[in-house]
Amino acid sequence: FGQSKERASKQALTMPVRTMDDIRKEREGGAAAPGVAGTGAATPNPWAGGAPAAGAAQGNYTTAGGYTPIPDQHSMGGVGAGDVFIDACGETVPVSSLSPWQLPMAMCCPCCIGDPCSLNRKYWYLAQMQTFIGIISIVEICVFVIEVVLSGTWGAILDVPSGTLAVMGGKVAALIAAGEYWRLVTPVMLHAGLFHLLINIFTQCMFGIQLEREWGAAQISVIYIAGGIYGNILSVLFAPQALSIGCSGAIFALFGAQVAYIVGMWRQLGDLQKKMLILSLGLSFLFIAAFSFSVGVDMSAHLGGFLVGNVLGLGYFSHLWAEDNWWHQHGKVVSWSVVGTTFTLSLIYFWHNTELGYGSDAAY
């Protein structure tokens, strides 16, 4: 960390740009990454001892933005800071070039490190728009524009009227009890104002896109949608009088799934990976805690999203547990059974439940 700014800048410029996707392809025998000679076979770990493979870059890589290392990446245990590089939004950044205050920044906002408008990052930004998280974010922005238009006032940009949100599908417990179960899904697309929208879009893009690269669009989409639904289910149960909207429950589901992933991966991680994960998760927890206890925030929706994300994550990543562990063999079945059963029981409980306001004229 004592490296001069000029030296760090030169090092960053001469560094071949390699992302986690590049490393995965090399290890699977795929196409060579930019600036790295192809070998036609899986690249052995150059830090496991012996001579490194021809053309292999001398360094270790971790992710930033998603905070989670992929299972097949090179071990980062026992290496110096000068040997570690962070994949920050498409740019390979050497940790040795970061000051002590920049390292936390690289973990929570990697695009702020280096040139935010470099050519590599422009391609990276375009690629993110083609992911599930990128597409759902664009849809949510478009829906917000519709909210403002239907409200008929410029003030709706900062504070959308409750009547507009209710008509467009916000969570209204009495209407859900009347059979409008689609209102367990539609609130995810709605936001109360510009600030609410920007906070959620920023969080899910910085947090979710990296996870989608590592887990795949199918898993991310299931966890995200289930998180939104279960967030609204708990909101109906514990805050039936509130008109709830937003994708916070879905975002918390991603966070819950990541915790489950780290639990499964923990025994495979190197010391430095564990330290960086603890740092990044700590920063995430502080941000989430501060946001969750703000005025007007539906804590029950956050809790519901986190719980279902954690349960689904424990099922999805049960294969990461030791083979002789009971959860390795039965985790997926248990996880899906719990989610399916609680979802069905919730719908049965909601049906024409007068405690939720069903039959009340004030609710319609």
Image: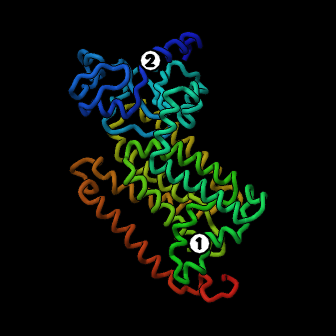
For residue 200, which numbered disc appears in the image? Answer: none
Mark 2 or mark 1, earlier in chain = 2
Mark 1 = which residue? 238
Front: mark 2 or 1: 2
* Dot 2: element: loop
Which amino acid is tagged 1?
Answer: Phe
* Dot 1: element: helix
In the depicted structure, whether residue 348 falls above or below residue 163: below
Q: In the rendering, at what x and y percent does residue 352 appear? A: 53, 87
In the depicted structure, whether residue 351 falls above or below residue 167: below
The residue positioned 49% from the left and 50% from the top of the image is 133
The C terminus lies in quadrant: bottom right
The residue positioned 49% from the left and 31% from the top of the image is 88
Which amino acid is tagged 2?
Answer: Met
Question: Quick one: 227 or 78, which is closer to the camera?
Answer: 227
Mark 2 = which residue? 15
Mark 2 residue crowding within 10 angstroms, few (<14) / some (14–19) / many (20+): some
